Amino acid sequence: MGSRLFKRIIKHKCIWIACLVIIVYLTPYYILGEDTHIRIHDNLDSNIVWYKMLAESGQIFTLTDTMLPNAINGLPRSTLPSSFDAVVWLYVLFEPMTAYTISQTIMRFVAFFGMYLLLTKFIFKKEQSAWITVGASLAFSMLPYWPSGALSIAGIPLAHYLFLMIRKYGWKTPKYIWLVLLLIPFLSNFVLSFVFFLLLMGLFWLIDWIHFKKSNWPFFTAIASMTSIYVVKNYLLITSMFLDSSFTSHREELDLGHNTFDRSYELAWENFLYGLTHDEAHQAYIIIPTILIALLVAVYSKVKPRLLLTLFLFNLALSFWYAYWYWEGWRVIKDNFMIANTFNFGRIHFLDPAIWYISFALAIAILWRYLKYGRVLVCLLVITQCLNLFGLTEELKYKDFNTPTFAEFYSEDLFDEVADYIGKDQSEYRVVSIGMHPTIAQYNGFYTLDTYNNSYPLEYKYAFRKVIQGELDKNPTLESYYDTWGGRLYMYVAEHGKDYMFTKDRNEPIEQLNINTQALAQLGGDYILSAVPIANEEELGLEYEQTFENKSSPWQIWLYSL
């Protein structure tokens, strides 16, 4: 009895220590605020601006797919987050950086407690050391998740735990379990990850039905209920896709997936070892070797690690499915079935991180029990992995990369100077950006003809292409990038390539910019905000207005009028 009590006390101490580590991990957001370095790709350059734009639009709730004038002369409301997205309301209630910090905090603690509950209640049949359950959960909570995904990846272990509770206890499941389960959709993305998770839960229910020869209706109800909430949450997206004939998305002409068989094979192993930028699990150097050693120890100890081996092989299969989704052999199907072209079925790999850390916990449990000095080794492995992930907190990682802070990236004071110089209401004119992300101008209230969005009218893609056709003709890589995908509707410059970060420390002039200013004017263009000087301005019919810079901003802006 005394031994059991001591173990409980140790476990609770470990949980408190883990929570303290997470708090320290989050400290830069709370102390530095807008002076924090955070991720730019698919974050500062897009999602944060989308949330802010929507929060300020007055169009959060709408039954029809209205147009927001801030971008491309009318960005469909359905292309921005749902009004039932809880993160949207964080941006309504708080300043963007505060909303971002709250979202990060929710994400980290849900990831930790969700994984801990799943491991202790369902993965392990017997009580395990806190080094195993708390250690793996802490590591999982510090992964460099895609920030705007909220619980799309971080919440999967918690959702799995809740479903298993309902599967086990049926209608006797405590009401708070149901409540938490039905709240998760408001903080996660259906299309990104939970569509695949729910499909797996549905398959799990079907296997149960066949195996036990009776249906588990509470479990089925939980799956159907969560799916229904996602459908309601995404009502605008669904109606615009299937019921609104007036909006043809640029996604209908996506032409992705031309990898050779060999390149797809290489990509499969790359994903298996390193993951992708949106779902990094950092499994290559600690987790995978630990799993392989654990499997060898299990064979030597005559243990059958069925779950560990199954999960390991399942992640391998997911990596191959993801990679071969971009294989050219799929083109026949993608070219003939719209859903296969517009929906990325390869995104099932977003389930990878949760699977890797469940596998990690299973592997170190084997080492702990069956390997001599295994307990010491497990402690070292957990500490090493946690230290590695702690070092990837955004402030440390992106400060090391020397990228701008939140405040520097958006440079509100500098863009206020530009707006004051122009001297008109920002809704009365349209701008485009060169050498920097157009969403920076959007964040600062400018109405832009360029943008970065997941979906927008295909017709506008054609019209904007006329503006940048001369530059695309000079760079086949950019031309393919725009024509086959086109999510970044940018003022591309051939000599810049896919570099959109020209700060005042690297602002060599563009000697021969080949854009169609007449086509730009027809779209309503009035000004160009350029991070670099344009040498052939007179040839293009541009009039140089003024250069703007200040000490607190990394940008130097050359303002040109048409």
Image (tube, rainbow, N blue to C red):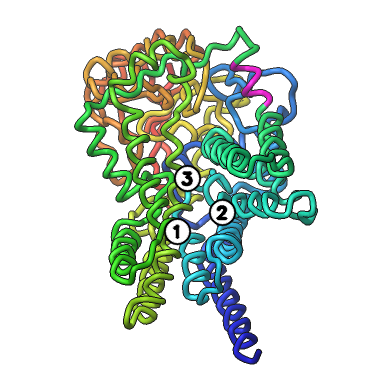
Query: If you read the primary sequence from the N terminus, does the residue marked by circle 1 or circle 2 appear first?
Result: 2
What segment is highlighted magenta in the picture?
235-241
| Mark 1 crowdedness (10 Å alpha carbons): few <14, some 14-19, many ≥20 | many
* Occupied quadrant, residue 73: top right
Question: Residue 524 or 27: which is nearer the viewer?
Answer: 27
- Callouts 3 and 1 close, C-beta under 8 Å: no
Mark 1: amino acid: Tyr
Instruction: Kindly identify which residue carries mark 2.
Output: 157
Q: In which quarter of the image is the C terminus?
A: top left
Q: Report the residue that reaches farthest toward the front.
A: 213
Which residue is the site of mark 3? 351
Can residue 370 be seen in the rendering of this structure? yes
Q: How far apart are marks 3 and 1 (CA)?
A: 11 Å
Q: Quadrant of residue 148?
A: top right
Is disc 3 placed on a helix, strand or loop? helix
Which sits earlier in the primary sequence, circle 3 or circle 1?
Answer: 3
Is 263 located above or below residue 33 in the figure?
A: above
On the image, the x and y values in percent for residue 26 come to: 54, 63
557 in the magenta segment: no
- Magenta stretch: dominant secondary structure: helix
Numbered mark located on residue 256 in the image: none
In this rendering, is residue 473 above or below 158?
A: above
Residue 85 appears anywhere in the view: no
Q: Badge 1 is on which residue?
A: 357
Q: Nearer the viewer, residue 127 or 95?
A: 127
Residue contact at pointers 1 and 2, CB within 8 angstroms: yes
